[in-house]
Amino acid sequence: MKRAARLLLAAVPLVAVAVYFLVPDQDTDGSGPDARSTASPADPSGQTGLAAPDKKDLAQRIVSSAENSSLDWRDQYGYIEDIGDGRGYTAGIIGFTTGTHDLLTLVERYTGSRPDNALARYLPALREVDGSDSHEGLDPGFTEAWKAESAIPAFRRAQDSERDRVYFTPAVRLAQRDGLGTLGQFIYYDAMVMHGPGTDPGFYGLRKDAMAEADTPTEGGDEKAYLDIFLDTRRKVMRAEKRDTTRIDTAQRQFLYDDNLGLETPLKWKIYGQPYEVR
């Protein structure tokens, strides 16, 4: 039997690869049969929910607060370092990594349209280290080449495109299919970014486990109850991986308990104890 959620409305609790899932086609503007009233009103662009430009920008800012300790996500295109998580180099606006295939795919696709780029010479090495934390063939030089290429608008656009293709669009479409509003779409997106589009224990695995315990709104369940259990499921995985869970505890869970299903501003949250605010 699926369990009921444990919504503690008065307080916040104290307190990672590339297997792709084919999601049935869904209207990206949120106007399909699974769109809910909790989605944001239509933007002049015609997009709703997290796909509306202002909400999409807000989503990038919240993710950047957790990934880069900064709200300025556009300043992260040239970011690159090995953070010691077993995934090699982490780079760019969404944390593409040399160990989990997405950075390799990004450089391959970019090189297809711009073969003379500064990163193309590292493709053989990137293929060799894919799936590991190795820097073999990348040092020295790769980090500086990444930073230099990131000053080029075409590479920035390539990062945006790959972010949307692999992470943002699939997460939002599936959240719409599950009957979730803007906050739920963001919760799915952030999980997709951090855990990857995999099943063990990637985003699709997390969703499967949550759906084993609670009905989605499309299945007739309560939106807040389902999201609370999804966050429980994700938090358990993060704790097992010894990851900091404040992006859930003092950000996403707080938005949920504040009944902010539309992810409306002004918005306040904390990551690693650091406060953030968007008006």
Image (cartoon, rainbow, N blue to C red):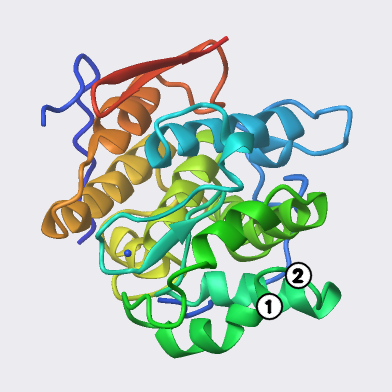
Above or below: residue 148 compared with residue 129: above
**Residue pointed to by mark 1:** 120
Instruction: Name the element at disc 2.
Output: loop
Quarter holding residue 131: bottom left
Q: Which mark is residue 11?
A: none
Q: Is residue 43 left or right of residue 96?
A: right
Residue 265 seen in the figure: yes
Q: CA distance from mark 2 to mark 1?
A: 6 Å
Does 5 sit above or below residue 178? above
Question: Mark 2 sits on what residue?
Answer: 117
Residue 246, position as x, y percentages in the image: 25, 34
Q: In the rendered image, which quarter contains the C terminus? A: top right
Give the image location of residue 86, x and y in percent.
Answer: 26, 69
Q: Check whether the beta carbons of the residues at disc 2 and disc 1 lie within 8 A of each other.
A: yes
Q: Residue at x 27, y 47 (%)?
A: 229
Q: Is 151 left or right of 191, judged from the image as shown?
A: right
For label 1, the SS is: helix
Q: Tell me the kind of residue under disc 1.
A: Ala
**Image position, residue 43 (x, y; %):** 81, 28
Q: Which quarter of the image is occupied by the N terminus?
A: bottom left
Which kind of residue does numbered mark 2 sit on? Asn
